[in-house]
Amino acid sequence: MQINNTVTRAFSVLVLGLAASLALGACADESSGGGDEVSFAVDVQPILMERCGGCHLKEANGAGKLSLGTNAELAYAALVDQTTMNTSCANLKRIDSTNHDPMQSSLFVKIVGTTCGKQMPAGMMPVLLTDVQIEVFRRWIAAGAPNN
Ligand code: HEC
Protein backbone atom coordinates (compact mmCIF):
# COMPACT_ATOMS: atom_id res chain seq x y z
CA MET A 1 0.00 0.00 0.00
CA GLN A 2 2.71 2.41 1.07
CA ILE A 3 4.77 1.58 -2.03
CA ASN A 4 1.75 1.92 -4.29
CA ASN A 5 1.06 5.37 -2.89
CA THR A 6 4.61 6.50 -3.46
CA VAL A 7 4.55 5.22 -7.03
CA THR A 8 1.24 6.96 -7.68
CA ARG A 9 2.54 10.21 -6.24
CA ALA A 10 5.74 10.02 -8.24
CA PHE A 11 3.72 9.36 -11.37
CA SER A 12 1.44 12.34 -10.88
CA VAL A 13 4.41 14.63 -10.23
CA LEU A 14 5.84 13.42 -13.52
CA VAL A 15 2.56 14.05 -15.36
CA LEU A 16 2.22 17.51 -13.83
CA GLY A 17 5.79 18.31 -14.79
CA LEU A 18 5.15 17.22 -18.37
CA ALA A 19 1.96 19.24 -18.61
CA ALA A 20 3.75 22.30 -17.25
CA SER A 21 6.59 22.05 -19.74
CA LEU A 22 4.14 21.54 -22.61
CA ALA A 23 2.26 24.65 -21.51
CA LEU A 24 5.52 26.62 -21.29
CA GLY A 25 6.53 25.34 -24.71
CA ALA A 26 3.26 26.57 -26.19
CA CYS A 27 3.77 29.99 -24.65
CA ALA A 28 7.29 30.24 -25.97
CA ASP A 29 6.04 29.45 -29.50
CA GLU A 30 3.42 32.12 -29.28
CA SER A 31 5.75 34.87 -28.20
CA SER A 32 8.35 34.10 -30.86
CA GLY A 33 6.00 33.82 -33.90
CA GLY A 34 3.28 35.77 -32.42
CA GLY A 35 0.76 38.45 -32.92
CA ASP A 36 2.91 40.51 -35.28
CA GLU A 37 3.05 37.90 -38.05
CA VAL A 38 1.83 39.29 -41.37
CA SER A 39 -0.91 37.26 -43.05
CA PHE A 40 -1.29 37.32 -46.82
CA ALA A 41 -5.06 36.85 -46.70
CA VAL A 42 -5.74 39.21 -43.80
CA ASP A 43 -3.11 41.93 -44.27
CA VAL A 44 -1.66 41.90 -47.80
CA GLN A 45 -4.50 40.97 -50.13
CA PRO A 46 -6.93 43.64 -48.85
CA ILE A 47 -4.32 46.29 -49.76
CA LEU A 48 -4.13 44.84 -53.28
CA MET A 49 -7.93 44.92 -53.50
CA GLU A 50 -8.19 48.48 -52.26
CA ARG A 51 -5.16 50.14 -53.86
CA CYS A 52 -4.44 48.16 -57.02
CA GLY A 53 -8.08 47.79 -57.93
CA GLY A 54 -9.47 48.69 -61.29
CA CYS A 55 -6.20 47.81 -63.00
CA HIS A 56 -5.10 44.41 -61.70
CA LEU A 57 -8.16 42.73 -60.22
CA LYS A 58 -9.28 40.87 -63.32
CA GLU A 59 -8.50 37.16 -63.47
CA ALA A 60 -7.06 37.65 -66.98
CA ASN A 61 -5.77 40.59 -69.02
CA GLY A 62 -5.04 42.80 -66.01
CA ALA A 63 -2.89 45.91 -66.54
CA GLY A 64 0.69 45.07 -67.48
CA LYS A 65 -0.40 41.39 -67.67
CA LEU A 66 -0.73 41.29 -63.88
CA SER A 67 -4.12 39.73 -63.10
CA LEU A 68 -4.66 39.32 -59.39
CA GLY A 69 -8.31 38.23 -59.28
CA THR A 70 -10.50 39.12 -56.34
CA ASN A 71 -9.49 36.65 -53.67
CA ALA A 72 -6.37 35.74 -51.75
CA GLU A 73 -5.92 32.36 -53.41
CA LEU A 74 -5.88 33.84 -56.94
CA ALA A 75 -3.70 36.77 -55.92
CA TYR A 76 -1.15 34.51 -54.22
CA ALA A 77 -0.96 32.25 -57.29
CA ALA A 78 -0.49 35.26 -59.58
CA LEU A 79 2.32 36.73 -57.53
CA VAL A 80 4.48 34.32 -55.65
CA ASP A 81 7.41 32.87 -57.58
CA GLN A 82 5.90 34.11 -60.84
CA THR A 83 8.02 35.61 -63.61
CA THR A 84 7.42 39.32 -64.07
CA MET A 85 6.27 40.66 -67.44
CA ASN A 86 8.07 43.84 -66.56
CA THR A 87 11.01 44.18 -68.95
CA SER A 88 13.04 46.56 -66.79
CA CYS A 89 13.23 43.94 -64.03
CA ALA A 90 12.89 40.77 -66.08
CA ASN A 91 15.47 39.02 -63.87
CA LEU A 92 13.22 39.28 -60.80
CA LYS A 93 10.14 37.31 -59.75
CA ARG A 94 7.03 39.32 -58.89
CA ILE A 95 7.45 38.00 -55.35
CA ASP A 96 10.41 35.75 -54.67
CA SER A 97 9.65 33.46 -51.74
CA THR A 98 13.22 32.14 -51.72
CA ASN A 99 14.78 35.57 -51.35
CA HIS A 100 13.88 37.40 -48.16
CA ASP A 101 15.28 40.71 -49.43
CA PRO A 102 12.17 42.65 -50.56
CA MET A 103 14.24 44.54 -53.15
CA GLN A 104 14.61 41.23 -55.00
CA SER A 105 10.83 41.08 -55.58
CA SER A 106 9.72 43.28 -58.50
CA LEU A 107 6.34 44.07 -56.95
CA PHE A 108 8.05 45.54 -53.91
CA VAL A 109 10.50 47.52 -56.06
CA LYS A 110 7.51 48.92 -57.97
CA ILE A 111 5.72 50.15 -54.86
CA VAL A 112 8.78 51.92 -53.43
CA GLY A 113 10.31 53.53 -56.52
CA THR A 114 10.92 53.56 -60.26
CA THR A 115 13.84 51.12 -60.65
CA CYS A 116 11.43 48.62 -62.25
CA GLY A 117 9.57 51.13 -64.42
CA LYS A 118 6.49 53.02 -63.26
CA GLN A 119 5.90 53.23 -59.54
CA MET A 120 2.68 51.51 -58.41
CA PRO A 121 -0.13 52.30 -57.93
CA ALA A 122 -0.03 53.96 -61.35
CA GLY A 123 -2.75 56.27 -62.63
CA MET A 124 -3.50 59.81 -63.68
CA MET A 125 -3.24 61.14 -60.12
CA PRO A 126 -1.64 58.25 -58.27
CA VAL A 127 -1.72 58.11 -54.50
CA LEU A 128 1.22 56.02 -53.37
CA LEU A 129 0.94 53.39 -50.68
CA THR A 130 1.43 54.63 -47.14
CA ASP A 131 4.56 53.70 -45.20
CA VAL A 132 2.42 51.40 -43.08
CA GLN A 133 1.11 49.55 -46.17
CA ILE A 134 4.62 49.25 -47.64
CA GLU A 135 5.82 47.88 -44.31
CA VAL A 136 3.17 45.12 -44.52
CA PHE A 137 4.63 43.97 -47.86
CA ARG A 138 8.20 44.29 -46.58
CA ARG A 139 7.55 42.13 -43.52
CA TRP A 140 5.53 39.56 -45.44
CA ILE A 141 8.31 39.09 -48.04
CA ALA A 142 11.01 39.06 -45.36
CA ALA A 143 9.12 36.19 -43.69
CA GLY A 144 9.31 34.16 -46.92
CA ALA A 145 5.98 35.26 -48.45
CA PRO A 146 3.91 32.55 -46.71
CA ASN A 147 0.48 31.60 -48.04
CA ASN A 148 -1.19 32.27 -44.71
C1 HEC B 1 -4.28 52.91 -62.73
C2 HEC B 1 -3.88 51.55 -63.01
C3 HEC B 1 -2.95 50.83 -62.09
C4 HEC B 1 -3.01 50.73 -60.71
C5 HEC B 1 -4.00 51.35 -59.76
C6 HEC B 1 -1.94 49.83 -60.33
N1 HEC B 1 -1.26 49.42 -61.45
FE1 HEC B 1 0.27 48.12 -61.50
N2 HEC B 1 0.44 48.32 -63.48
C7 HEC B 1 -0.33 49.16 -64.26
C8 HEC B 1 0.19 49.17 -65.62
C9 HEC B 1 -0.37 49.98 -66.79
C10 HEC B 1 1.30 48.30 -65.65
C11 HEC B 1 2.24 47.95 -66.83
C12 HEC B 1 3.38 48.95 -66.91
C13 HEC B 1 4.47 48.69 -65.92
O1 HEC B 1 4.87 47.55 -65.73
O2 HEC B 1 4.96 49.65 -65.30
C14 HEC B 1 1.42 47.77 -64.30
C15 HEC B 1 2.37 46.86 -63.91
C16 HEC B 1 2.49 46.36 -62.64
C17 HEC B 1 3.44 45.34 -62.24
C18 HEC B 1 4.41 44.63 -63.16
C19 HEC B 1 3.71 43.43 -63.78
C20 HEC B 1 4.50 42.16 -63.72
O3 HEC B 1 4.43 41.34 -64.64
O4 HEC B 1 5.19 41.92 -62.70
C21 HEC B 1 3.29 45.14 -60.90
C22 HEC B 1 4.05 44.16 -60.03
C23 HEC B 1 2.24 46.00 -60.46
N3 HEC B 1 1.77 46.73 -61.53
C24 HEC B 1 1.82 46.08 -59.17
C25 HEC B 1 0.83 46.96 -58.73
C26 HEC B 1 0.44 47.08 -57.36
C27 HEC B 1 1.02 46.27 -56.22
C28 HEC B 1 -0.52 48.04 -57.32
C29 HEC B 1 -1.23 48.55 -56.11
C30 HEC B 1 -0.43 48.96 -55.01
C31 HEC B 1 -0.73 48.50 -58.68
N4 HEC B 1 0.11 47.83 -59.50
C32 HEC B 1 -1.66 49.46 -59.04
C33 HEC B 1 -1.42 49.87 -63.85
C34 HEC B 1 -1.83 50.02 -62.53
Image: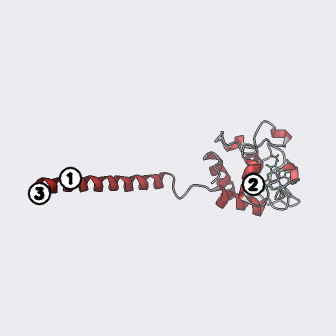
How far is mark 1 from mark 3, CA to CA?
Answer: 14 Å
**Picture coordinates of residue 127 (x, y %)?**
79, 60
Name the image quarter holding residue 5.
bottom left
**Between 4 and 60, which is closer to the camera in this rendering?**
4
Q: Vertical placement of 106 versus 134: above or below?
A: above
The residue under label 2 is 75
Label 1, residues with CA under 10 Å away: few <14, some 14-19, many ≥20: few
Q: Which kind of residue does numbered mark 1 sit on?
A: Ala
**Could you tell which of marks 3 and 2 lies nearer the N-terminus?**
3
The residue under label 1 is 10
**Picture coordinates of residue 77 (x, y %)?**
74, 50
Q: Is residue 137 visible?
A: yes
How far is mark 1 from mark 2, CA to CA?
Answer: 55 Å
Secondary structure, mark 3, is loop
Looking at the image, residue 2 sits to the left or right of residue 124; the answer is: left
**Could you tell which of marks 1 and 2 lies nearer the N-terminus?**
1
Rendered residue at 81%/50% (across/down): 119
Q: Which kind of residue does numbered mark 3 sit on?
A: Met
Q: Which kind of residue does numbered mark 2 sit on?
A: Ala
Secondary structure, mark 1, is helix
Looking at the image, residue 100 sits to the left or right of residue 76; the answer is: left
**Picture coordinates of residue 113 (x, y %)?**
77, 48
Q: Is residue 112 visible?
A: no
User: Closer to the observer: label 1 or label 2?
Assistant: 1
**Between 142 and 98, which is closer to the camera in this rendering?**
98
Rendered residue at 75%/51% (across/down): 111
User: Closer to the observer: label 3 or label 2?
Assistant: 3
How far is mark 3 from mark 2, CA to CA?
Answer: 67 Å
The residue under label 3 is 1
